[in-house]
């Protein structure tokens, strides 16, 4: 008889546990000296700009007193460029081929953190995300990778046309330093090889083939992307872009919470 009563009591207590939000670390505050929430963002796959990721975040706290969970994204971009040009000149019966190769490592581009979601949403309760099997708030949010993280995939002439002004200025400024008279009259066929404004000459009146400052200025002012492509042997870019997703769970009445972050590669 007593044995039957004990079995019934166990069943009854188990049933009560199944109806409550169970806290697997009830002594968390005592052990750490602080009452902080648990917060964990699952790792996401690599993705391209425009792709949709299903972000999954799990959070819980003592007494389940989490006020909100916020989602942020930030990132960085590193791009390395390689360019190769060749120009065949023929001035005064002298033929030469000039080959020019350059590598440019663009300064890293940093994207500051932006909050793109916060739960619970207006007029709703965080309890609707509570899952008894995990004893935690489980939030799944669809995140579309912003276009700002789109990687560069252009090559050759398309890449020259797509360059931002910083990289394009690097190319033109660098080429301007190696320009000479044969190169100039080849790149600009309408430019007279006897132009004394742009071309340097010595004390005896002979051209040295070097440019005067005005000649360099002419090159920088008149060179175009399309004209550069006429002498382009190849252009490539290596684009390394990473995006970090961060979540923060904040307790009621607190200003700082527990953070979790994951980083994925933009492909």
Image (cartoon, rainbow, N blue to C red):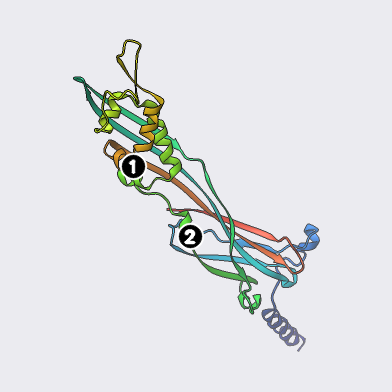
User: Looking at the picture, how far across and down is residue 137, in whole percent?
Assistant: 63, 71
Does residue 177 appear left or right of residue 32 in this picture? left
Among the 4 quarters of the image, the one containing residue 188: top left
Which residue is painted at 52% across and 43% down in the image?
A: 108
Q: Which quadrant holds the N terminus? A: bottom right
Which residue is painted at 68% across and 83% down in the image?
A: 15
Q: Which mark is residue 225?
A: 1
Looking at the picture, tell me which residue is in the foreground, 68 or 184: 184
Query: Which is more foreground, mark 1 or mark 2?
Result: 1
For the residues labelled 1 and 2, say whether their Cβ atoms are less than 8 Å apart: no
Does residue 93 appear left or right of residue 246 in this picture? left
Kindly state the secondary structure of the residue where label 2 is placed. Answer: loop
**Outermost residue, top side:** 204
- 138 up-or-down from 243: above or below: below
Which residue is painted at 43% across and 38% down in the image?
A: 169
Looking at the picture, tell me which residue is in the foreground, 99 or 198: 198
**Outermost residue, bottom side:** 1
Kindly state the secondary structure of the residue where label 1 is placed. Answer: helix
Does residue 22 appear left or right of residue 264 in this picture? right
- 174 up-or-down from 43: above or below: above
Looking at the picture, tell me which residue is in the foreground, 131 or 102: 102
Looking at the picture, tell me which residue is in the foreground, 237 or 253: 237
Among the 4 quarters of the image, the one containing residue 254: bottom right
- 184 up-or-down from 116: above or below: above
User: Looking at the picture, how far across and down is residue 114, in whole percent?
Assistant: 58, 59
User: Looking at the picture, how far across and down is residue 156, in whole percent?
Assistant: 31, 42
Which residue is painted at 39% across and 43% down in the image?
A: 237
First in residue order: circle 1 vs circle 2: 2
* Residue receiving disc 2: 146
Does residue 161 appear left or right of residue 90 in this picture? right
């Amino acid at each position: 008889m007593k044995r039957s009563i004990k079995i019934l009591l166990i069943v009854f207590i188990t049933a009560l546990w199944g109806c409550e939000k169970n806290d697997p670390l009830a002594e968390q505050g005592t052990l750490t000296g602080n009452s902080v929430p648990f917060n964990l963002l699952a790792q996401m796959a690599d993705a391209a700009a425009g792709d949709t990721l299903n972000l999954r975040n799990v959070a819980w706290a003592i007494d389940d007193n989490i006020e909100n969970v916020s989602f942020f994204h930030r990132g960085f971009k590193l791009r390395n460029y390689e360019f190769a040009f060749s120009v065949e000149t023929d001035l005064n019966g002298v033929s030469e081929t000039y080959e020019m190769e350059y590598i440019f490592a663009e300064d890293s581009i940093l994207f500051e953190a932006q909050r793109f979601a916060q739960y619970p949403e207006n007029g709703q309760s965080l309890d609707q995300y509570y899952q008894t099997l995990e004893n935690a708030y489980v939030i799944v949010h669809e995140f579309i990778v912003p276009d700002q993280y789109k990687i560069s995939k252009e090559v050759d002439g398309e890449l020259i046309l797509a360059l931002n002004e910083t990289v394009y200025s690097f190319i033109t400024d660098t080429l301007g330093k190696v320009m000479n008279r044969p190169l100039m009259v080849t790149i600009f066929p309408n430019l007279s090889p006897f132009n004394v404004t742009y071309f340097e000459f010595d004390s005896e009146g002979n051209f040295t083939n070097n440019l005067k400052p005005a000649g360099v200025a002419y090159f920088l002012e008149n060179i175009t992307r399309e004209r550069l492509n006429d002498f382009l042997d190849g252009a490539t870019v290596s684009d390394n872009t990473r995006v970090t997703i961060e979540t923060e769970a904040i307790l009621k009445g607190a200003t700082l919470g527990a953070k979790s972050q994951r980083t994925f590669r933009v492909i």
